[in-house]
Image: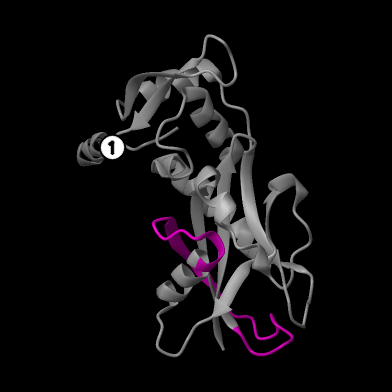
């Protein structure tokens, strides 16, 4: 049997989260699992992963990429199952309210993850490591942010991804020196009366960096 499992990352003001659900059937009924499905006979692996993502979040235009295959003979006691894992990134303010309650899906903070079935913990760890590697050289973090964001919000996101604190002044200087952000006249005043200016990511400016052979290194 061929299956897909989706590692769905979400980001809000509190940090990076993972979407899990409780299995409805045996084996492992009521235990926490990544969200997945068997691949249909006339369906590609990519389409199967996109179907799973849409069914549980209501979203289609979300960054998603294949992670790898998991095919140990004894990985699933229920049957001989090979799983092609995918990881996806989403902004929680867009997707959290669209998750069907029927699936009993729930967002978990990474320091509060429950025990996962099968080899799903290995999948999560591999996806998080790939996310960290990509974040060092590509502006993948912007997939998790709202269209308009502050520099502190951007820094917090990368701190969560890297799991370490970043120097505020150096981070701001580095990101602004890349000239890939547009400063807006608007301010976010949710955390202070003075507020912080909002910015917008400019993909065209990033493409110019790539053409010049400059890496997006934070």
Residue 141 percent across, percent down from the top left: 46, 41
Indicate yes or no whether the magenta region holds residue 119: no
Indicate yes or no whether the magenta region holds residue 69: yes
User: Image quarter for residue 190?
Assistant: top right
Q: In which quarter of the image is the C terminus?
A: top left
| Residue at image location 61% in from the left, 43% down from the top | 16
Q: Pick out the residue farthest to the top.
A: 194
Label 1 Cα neighbours within 10 Å, binned few <14 / some 14-19 / many ≥20: many
Q: What stretch is highlighted in magenta?
A: 55-81
User: Image quarter for residue 143?
Assistant: top left
Count the labels in the image: 1
Question: Which color mode does the image show?
Answer: one colour
Q: In which quarter of the image is the N terminus?
A: bottom right
User: Image quarter for residue 165?
Assistant: top right
| Above or below 102: residue 130 | above
Side (left or right) of 156 relative to 60 = right
Residue 114 percent across, percent down from the top left: 78, 57
| Residue at image location 63% in from the left, 33% down from the top | 164
The residue identified by callout 1 is 206
Residue 30 percent across, percent down from the top left: 79, 71
The residue nearer to you, when weighing 130 against 103, is 103
Q: What element carries label 1?
A: helix
Residue 209 percent across, percent down from the top left: 25, 35
| Residue at image location 53% in from the left, 59% down from the top | 57
| Residue at image location 45% in from the left, 48% down from the top | 134
Side (left or right) of 113 relative to 155 = right
């Amino acid at each position: 049997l061929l299956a897909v499992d989706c590692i769905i990352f979400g980001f809000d003001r509190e940090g990076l989260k993972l979407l899990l659900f409780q299995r409805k059937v045996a084996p492992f009924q009521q235990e926490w699992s990544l969200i997945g499905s068997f691949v249909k006979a006339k369906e590609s692996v990519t389409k199967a992963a996109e179907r799973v993502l849409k069914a549980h979040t209501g979203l289609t235009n979300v960054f998603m990429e294949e992670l790898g295959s998991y095919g140990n003979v004894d990985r699933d006691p229920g049957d001989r199952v090979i799983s092609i894992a995918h990881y996806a990134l989403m902004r929680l303010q867009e997707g959290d309210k669209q998750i069907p309650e029927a699936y009993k899906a729930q967002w978990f903070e990474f320091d509060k993850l429950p025990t996962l079935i099968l080899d799903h913990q290995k999948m999560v760890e591999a996806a998080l490591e790939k996310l960290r590697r990509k974040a060092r050289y590509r502006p993948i973090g912007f997939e998790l942010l709202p269209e308009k964001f502050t520099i502190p919000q951007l820094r917090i996101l990368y701190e969560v991804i890297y799991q370490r604190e970043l120097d505020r002044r150096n981070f701001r200087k580095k990101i602004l020196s890349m000239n890939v952000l547009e400063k807006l006249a608007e301010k976010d005043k949710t955390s202070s009366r003075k507020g912080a200016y909002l910015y917008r990511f400019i993909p065209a400016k990033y493409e110019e960096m790539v053409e010049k052979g400059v890496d997006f290194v934070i």
